[in-house]
Image (spheres, helix red, strand yellow):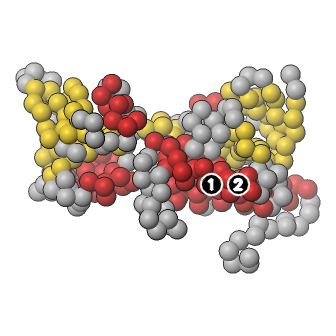
Amino acid sequence: MSIEHVKCLIIGSGPAGYTAAIYAARANMKPVLYQGQQPGGQLTTTNEVENFPGYVDGVTGPEMMVQLMKQAQRFETDVRDGWITKVDFSGPVHKAWINGETEIHADTVIISTGASAKYLGLESEQKYLKMGGGVSACAVCDGFFYRGQETIIVGAGDSACEEAHYLSKLCTKVTMLVRRDEFRASKIMANRVKNTENIEILFNTETVEVLGDDVGVTGARVKNNITGGVQDIPATGFFVAIGHKPNTDIFKEYLTLDETGYIVNVPGSSKTNVEGVFVSGDAADHVYRQAITAAGTGCMAALDAERYLASREGVEAVGVSNNYTD
């Protein structure tokens, strides 16, 4: 097996990984970035991105990821296909294996593996998700496209309540589907949706099928899991808020994770419990989960990695050029 030594290994793409690469490359850290199983991350499933600063007329998620990748490559980031299948952070040299074949020894590692939204797994749900025609796992990202329309949201936790309340400000009606006879959310969040006039809550209700046509979603067929009654609910947007799973399983032997698998970082930094290993984006962020916040933490991780290298080498940090000095 071949062994390669690099200054900075970035695991995962998306706004966090590519931003980290841009900063690391400009600091002459010669980053090597592996794109992972979903190059570009979650944004590649998003049709329109209208809330990322600088895109006056909006941009598609895939197009934005291509632009970020090209910007990283402009500064000579080595962007590669493939994904990390195993790591070893037990010693002073950080080791990673790519596709079970190539072994990389890295002075610094930036983890940008993100998180994957959980879906119901219905064939019709996946059809309209891939089509970009009305299924979403992020109301804050996509709710704006459904203003003045009727929407459905599935979920019972704090995030589901928060997203339902957010949608209620944009949509004429929000129907909330809760599988059990009560919320899992905190009382204050549950009461907020209960007291919102245009949110209808259907307890003991599960989705049978997402309905739609060649354009997109037109509603959902739901079933009361106690009475067995079935009804069709009209809607143009179908939101799923049943949680995210951080893509961090391969790091759990070495990094501190919280109870749901998110990497725990040192507050106010991107540092993990292992020196020289940093985290950015949704692999650590279970609160905001936005492209712009992911990009910000990618910047932080590259700056932290550069300072770590400088302190290790015993030389003064060169400093990453930024908008204040360019």
The x and y percentages for residue 2 are 88, 26
Crowd tier of the residue under label 1, counting other residues whose Cα lies within 10 Å: few below 14, some 14–19, many 20 or above = many
Residue 237, percent from left and from top: 26, 45
Q: Secondary structure at mark 2?
A: helix
The numbered mark at residue 92 is: none
Label pair 1/2, CB-CB below 8 angstroms: yes
Say above or below: 249 vs 143: above
- The reply to whether residue 157 is in sight is no
**Which residue corresponds to the image point at 19% horizontal and 58% vertical from the top-left?**
148
**For mark 2, does the 10 Å Cα neighbourhood hold few (<14), some (14 to 19), or many (20 or more) residues?**
many
> Residue at the location (71% across, 25% down)?
99
Residue behind mark 1? 68
Q: Amino acid at mark 1?
A: Leu
Label disc, if present, on residue 72 of the rendered structure: 2
Considering the image in quadrants, where does the N terminus appear?
A: top right
Asked whether, in this view, residue 133 is left or right of residue 308, the answer is left
Residue at 14% across, 41% down: 234
